[in-house]
Image (tube, rainbow, N blue to C red):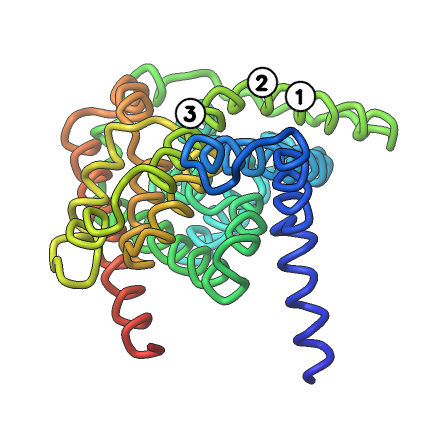
């Protein structure tokens, strides 16, 4: 058992966390005559390390996930979801969202397609909530920083929010609050042709490059903010605002995260820096969920598809769920400590 734990720790630290890369960058900067204790050099080291780490993991993950996703085109996904009813359908939709490497804005076209195809509204909302919040890429990246236990719990809590949220929307009978152009859209259900392995590899490669082009600017911004927090923001500031002494830290983090627009890959370096400065774990995770699920651009896009009452219910469910998850994590962290 001890040997397995040692192997896992090495895998998490060296393979997922790429600790060797941080050491390599530090040595390279030293060879170039730079003082690693200098704040500017420390920021540069953090920026280079996190950028390379996230891009490498992102490319590998998106390629693998996209290859898997090639077996589940929208037409097939609609048929799979159509076989289930009730909370089972919400659960399947939430799980399906985990294998779609999309940000919140990219998930909305699929949500519209599923809704116009006649799938239950609650089912499509379970997909919409889980897709940006708990994709498989986030699981691996979270493992690289926070460890396997936290990563798995994050995904589980995210799925719970998605399932419960979709179920509430379904029980509320909100179909009348979907815009008419979606409800009256023509339903096209064409079987996708069988793809060869080469076709799937090509598709995975194209998806990887396309996703990288879309998210790279947000990765750069996120890592830049993380480097700023890590080396320039006093620890006392972060602790006073987001630490255990502030009972409203989770609420503040969630509200601050909502106006931002990024995916999980852009928010992780910020979360990493906040945690290192003394922010509580649940508070940091609430910030990440708020950014990825309730960004202003995605809400503007969603408003085109649903009416204000349904949009307000969606925002309320997600916000309350995220805040509850944050406090739950903080409570668990306090018990463990």
The residue wearing badge 2 is: 213
Residue 304 spot, x, y in % from top left: 28, 17
Give the alpha-carbon distance from disc 1 to disc 2, as whole Å.
6 Å
Q: Quadrant of residue 14?
A: bottom right
The kind of secondary structure element at disc 2 is: helix
Residue 190 visible to the viewer: yes
Number of callouts: 3
Q: Which residue is mark 3?
A: 221
Q: Position of residue 47 (x, y in %)?
A: 51, 32
Residue 123 vertical placement versus 44 (above, below): below
Evaluate if marks 3 and 2 touch, with contact meaning CB atoms under 8 Å apart. Answer: no
Residue in view at x 26 percent, y 50 percent: 235
Residue 209 disc label = 1
Q: Quadrant of the N terminus?
A: bottom right
Q: Dots 1 and 2: beta carbons under 8 Å?
A: yes
Foreground: disc 3 or disc 2: 3
Q: CA distance from mark 1 to mark 3?
A: 19 Å
């Amino acid at each position: 058992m001890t040997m397995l734990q040692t192997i896992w720790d090495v895998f998490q630290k060296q393979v997922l966390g790429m600790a060797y890369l941080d050491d390599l960058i530090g040595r390279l900067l030293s060879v170039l005559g730079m003082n690693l204790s200098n704040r500017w050099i420390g920021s540069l080291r953090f920026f280079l390390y996190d950028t390379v780490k996230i891009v490498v993991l992102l490319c590998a993950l998106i390629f693998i996930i996209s290859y898997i996703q090639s077996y589940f085109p929208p037409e097939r996904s609609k048929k799979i979801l159509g076989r289930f009813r009730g909370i089972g359908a919400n659960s399947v939709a939430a799980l399906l969202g985990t294998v779609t490497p999309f940000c919140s804005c990219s998930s909305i076209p699929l949500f519209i397609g599923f809704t116009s195809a006649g799938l239950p509204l609650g089912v499509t909302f379970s997909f919409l909530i889980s897709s940006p919040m708990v994709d498989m890429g986030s699981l691996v990246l979270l493992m690289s920083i926070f460890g396997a236990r936290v990563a798995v719990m994050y995904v589980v809590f995210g799925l719970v929010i998605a399932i419960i949220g979709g179920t509430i929307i379904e029980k509320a009978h909100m179909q009348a609050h979907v815009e008419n152009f979606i409800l009256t859209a023509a339903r096209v259900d064409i079987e996708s042709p069988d793809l060869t392995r080469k076709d799937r590899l090509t598709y995975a490669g194209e998806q990887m490059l396309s996703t990288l082009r879309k998210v790279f600017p947000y990765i750069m911004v996120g890592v830049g903010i993380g480097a700023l927090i890590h080396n320039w923001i006093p620890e006392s500031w972060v602790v006073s605002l987001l630490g255990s002494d502030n009972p409203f830290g989770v609420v503040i983090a969630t509200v601050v995260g909502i106006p931002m627009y990024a995916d999980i890959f852009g928010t992780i370096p910020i979360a990493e820096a906040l945690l290192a400065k003394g922010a509580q774990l649940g508070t940091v995770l609430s910030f990440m969920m708020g950014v990825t699920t309730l960004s202003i651009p995605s809400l503007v896009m969603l408003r085109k598809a649903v009416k204000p009452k349904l949009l307000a219910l969606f925002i309320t469910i997600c916000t309350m769920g995220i805040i509850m998850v944050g406090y739950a994590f903080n409570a668990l962290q306090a018990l463990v400590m």
